[in-house]
Image (spheres, helix red, strand yellow):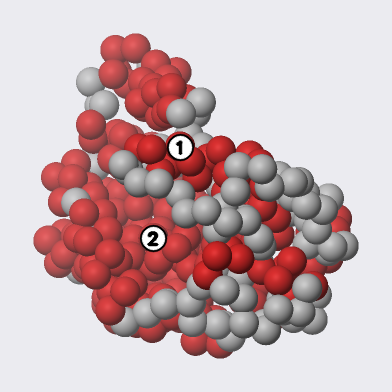
């Protein structure tokens, strides 16, 4: 079963025949390794440091940011929202939130520490106040990954194996793939990213995602039939625009939905659930099409994309224009 991304196959098709798949994989991952050079240059989040009580470290980061931007930090004390609530300050002045290099380390109340254990974090994610959001978000991530990677593989399968054939002929024709169609469909990533950048702040997170999911269903529906290669490529191109946009927006929405104490854990677990969908989708995109069940394969994608859009509609929070939350209280 071939699960290599079509983009990689197209751009590095010279490597595979001459050097083999190991070199193909190594060269494909090489650009990402350069990001490690920026690891030490990336400052820690002052918000995270404050919630852990490391206000001195937070001030140091903020001072560095101010120097880079040619600004000075205002005088005062760095105080978190939790401290203000504990001190019962109804109308804190602006100075109460400001900075002082002599601020002492502050210990936060129980349940506000960002350094929660894995089990504790999971229990918070599944607590009555977050359980609905968490489960729906898992479903959206699963549907997003399943659909995205499935469409990548369908681009190859529907154009390379548009007719039902025996296993022997599939093996003989395994290299008979239209790289032109793959190349065209892969360009859907660019308008998809641009569309998400525009829609996420114009329409909001939820409306943008749900609309793109439902439109994707419309583009996928004709693929239940065997269509000419050009029309198939065009429909997959439009569907990939939509699913790329939803995949981008959900990674914007998810961190905004969770409070700081469980934000990274919540997004990480949701992303992991999505990867499960990515692992399952080749069994559908490749297995069913090869098994002469193209209609069933496309209908399954239709159902998953539709259910993902419905889950987005029922998400309880629209985060556009909202401040990030520090506590579980909503």
Identity of the residue drawn at 23% across and 35% down:
10
**For this rendering, which residue is in front, 80 or 325?**
80
- Quarter of the rendering containing residue 28: top left
Q: Position of residue 139 (x, y in %)?
A: 59, 71
Q: Relative to 303, is 55 above or below? A: above
Crowding near pointer 1: few (<14 within 10 Å), some, many (20+)? some
**For this rendering, which residue is in front, 254 or 280?**
254
Q: Which mark is residue 248?
A: 2
Q: Quadrant of the C terminus?
A: bottom right
Q: Position of residue 188 (x, y in %)?
A: 22, 57
Identity of the residue drawn at 42% across and 77% down:
320
- State left or right for residue 126 relative to residue 81: right
Crowding near pointer 2: few (<14 within 10 Å), some, many (20+)? some
Q: Which mark is residue 64?
A: 1
Identity of the residue drawn at 71% across and 79% down:
89
**For this rendering, which residue is in front, 31 or 57?**
57
Residue 320 makes an appearance in the image: yes
Looking at the image, tell me whether mark 1 or mark 2 is earlier in sequence order.
1
* Labels 1, 2: front one: 1
- State left or right for residue 55 relative to residue 310: right
- Quarter of the rendering containing residue 305: bottom left
Identity of the residue drawn at 47% across and 54% down:
74
- State left or right for residue 163 relative to residue 140: left
Q: Position of residue 45 (x, y in %)?
A: 56, 47
Kindly state the secondary structure of the residue where label 1 is placed: helix
Q: Position of residue 221 (x, y in %)?
A: 32, 78
Q: Residue furthest front?
A: 75
Q: CA distance from mark 1 to mark 2?
A: 30 Å
């Amino acid at each position: 079963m071939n699960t290599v991304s079509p983009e990689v196959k197209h751009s590095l098709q010279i490597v595979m025949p001459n050097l083999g798949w190991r070199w193909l994989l190594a060269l494909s991952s090489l650009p990402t390794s350069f990001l490690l050079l920026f690891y030490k240059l990336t400052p820690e989040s002052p918000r995270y440091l404050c919630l852990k009580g490391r206000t001195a470290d937070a001030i140091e980061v903020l001072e560095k940011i101010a120097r880079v931007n040619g600004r000075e930090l205002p005088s005062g004390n760095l105080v978190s929202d939790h401290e203000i609530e504990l001190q019962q300050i109804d109308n804190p002045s602006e100075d109460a939130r400001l900075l002082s290099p002599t601020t002492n380390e502050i210990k936060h109340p129980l349940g506000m520490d960002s350094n929660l254990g894995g089990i504790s974090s999971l229990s918070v994610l599944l607590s009555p106040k977050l359980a609905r959001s968490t489960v729906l978000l898992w479903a959206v991530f699963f549907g997003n990954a399943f659909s995205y990677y499935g469409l990548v593989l369908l681009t190859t399968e529907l154009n390379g194996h548009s007719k039902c054939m025996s296993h022997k002929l599939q093996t003989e024709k395994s290299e008979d793939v239209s790289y032109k169609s793959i190349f065209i469909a892969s360009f859907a990533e660019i308008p998809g990213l641009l569309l998400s950048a525009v829609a996420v702040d114009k329409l909001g997170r939820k409306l943008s995602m749900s609309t793109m999911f439902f439109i994707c269903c419309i583009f996928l529906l004709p693929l239940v039939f065997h269509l000419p290669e050009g029309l198939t490529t065009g429909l997959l191109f439009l569907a990939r625009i939509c699913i790329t946009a939803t995949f981008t927006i959900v990674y914007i929405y998810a961190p905004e939905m969770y409070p700081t104490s469980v934000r990274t854990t919540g997004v990480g677990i949701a992303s992991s659930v999505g990867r499960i969908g990515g692992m399952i989708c080749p069994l559908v995109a490749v297995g069913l099409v090869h098994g002469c069940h193209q209609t069933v394969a496309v209908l399954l994608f239709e159902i998953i994309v539709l259910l993902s859009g419905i889950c987005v509609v029922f998400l309880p929070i629209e985060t556009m224009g909202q401040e990030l939350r520090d506590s579980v209280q909503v």
